[in-house]
Image (cartoon, rainbow, N blue to C red):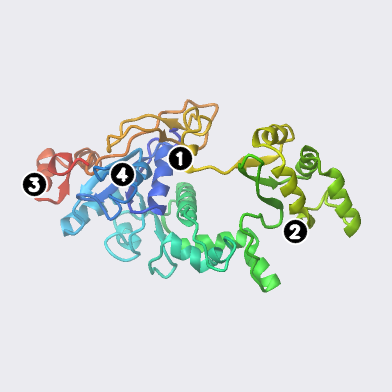
Amino acid sequence: MYSFLDGLSIIEASSFVASPTAGLYCAQFGAQVIRVDQTGGGPDYRRWPVTEANDSLYWENLNRAKKSVAVDLRKPEGREIVQELVRATGQLITNFPVDGFLSHALLAQGCPDLVTLRIMGWADGSPALDYTINNAVGYPMLTGTGPDPVNHVLPAWDLISGAYGAFAMLAAMQWRSTSGEGCEIRLPLSDVAIGTVANLGALAEMLYTGRDRPRLGNAVYGLFGRDFTTRDGVRIMIVVATHRQWANLLVALGLSEDVAAIEQERGVSFEQDDGLRYTLRDMLYPLFERAIRSRDYADLSTAFDAGGIVFSPYRRMLDAVHDPALVANNPIFGTVPNPSGFDYPAAGTFATVPQMHRREPCPAPYNGQHTEEVLADLLSLPAAEIGRLIDAGIVGNIASGDPK
C-alpha cells in the first residue's frame, strides 16, 4: 500500500474480475474505493474458491482495501442512493450496462465533470467473459499440441483490462484537471484482447502470412525455448533471450562442437540469429535433450545460474505458495485479519517504491461494513435517516445481515 492517491474517492459497482481489479489497484495506491454491493452480496460474492463456511477467498482478495456500502439495488430509492454517491465523489468504476441507472449521461446530469470507467464484454454492449473472448481472438487454437483447442486457466484479458482500466481512469482524471471536463471510458474486453494481439505483432503476422502459427506445445515461438527433463526426472523450461545466453548455454551443456557441426553442415550461424535457432529447432532439440537427460537438476541449475541462463523447473502452485522467495520473504505480502477468518499472506501493491515506506495490506470489507460511515460522510445523512433506510431494507450493514 502506498499513499499516491490519498484523498481520491471512487465508487465501484462491479463484479467478477476485470472491474474489481481496476478498483483494487487504485485502492492499493491509496484511493478510497467504495464498493456498492447488493445487500447480502452480488453475483460473485460466493464465487469459488470458498472455505468450508462458504466464504469466497476469490472475492476477499479482489476487494482488499475497499469499503462496502450495501444497498438493495432492486429498489428505486436504493438506486438513487448509489447515484448520489457517484455524484458526490465524481468517479465511478463499473461493469454495469451502458444504459440504466448507472448510465454516464444520467449520472453526469448532476455531476458534469464525472469520470466513469465502464468495463464491458463486447463493444456493442453484449456480454462476454474472458474465456469466450480468448476463444474469439484465436489463442486456444495456438495453445497446446493440437488438434483440440486448449483454454488456458489464467483470465488474462480480465486482468489486463483491470490494469488498463485503472490507468485509463487516472489519465482521464489528469485530463479533467486541466480541461475541467469529465468523460466516460468504455473498455471492452474484446478490444483489449484484439488490441493486444495487434500490439504483439500477431495481427500483422496473420495478415502477412495468411496462416496460423503452428501448434508448438511448450516450445516458444521465434526463440530457442522448450521444456526438457533432467536425469533425475525434473522437468525444466529453458528460454534463450539473448545471444550471450545462447553462448553460455552451449558451454554449460558442452554442446559447442556439436552445434558447430550443424552450422557447418547447413552453412549457417546460430550465434546472432534467434529466428534461425527457432527455424532449425528440430535439429537442435535432440542434442539438448541428450545433454540435459545425462545430468541431474542440481548440477544443471548451478551451471545455468553461473551462465545467466533463463530457466525454471515446473512445479505445482501448491509448491510455489510455499516458496520463501515468492511469498514468506516477499515484502509485497503482509498479514491482516480476513473476513473469512482464514489467516494467510495478503498481497499489497506489486510495485515497490524504495523511497517510500510500504504500508501493510488491508483486509476486504464485510458486506455493508461501511454503509453508515459512507452515507454520513459523503451524503451528510443524519443518523435518523440512515436508521430509516436500514429499517426499510433500502440499505444494509453488518448488524442487519450476515457479517460474512
Residue at image coords 10%, 42% = 387
Whether residue 66 is situated above or below residue 191 in the rendered picture: above
Residue for badge 2: 282
> Would residue 187 be visible to someone looking at this image?
no
Extreme-bottom residue of the structure: 210
Residue for badge 1: 318
Residue for badge 3: 391
Spatial CA span between label 1 and label 4? 33 Å
Which amino acid, by three-letter code, is at mark 3? Asp
Secondary element under disc 1, as helix, strand or loop, is helix
What quarter of the picture does the N terminus occupy? top left
Residue at image coords 8%, 46% = 391
* Sequence order check, earlier mark of 2 and 3: 2
Is residue 123 found left or right of 284 in the rendered image? Answer: left
Residue contact between numbered discs 2 and 3, judged by CB atoms under 8 Å: no
> Residue 128, image x and y in percent?
40, 65
* Sequence order check, earlier mark of 3 and 1: 1
- Residue 295 occupies quadrant: top right
> Residue 14, image x and y in percent?
33, 53
Residue for badge 4: 34
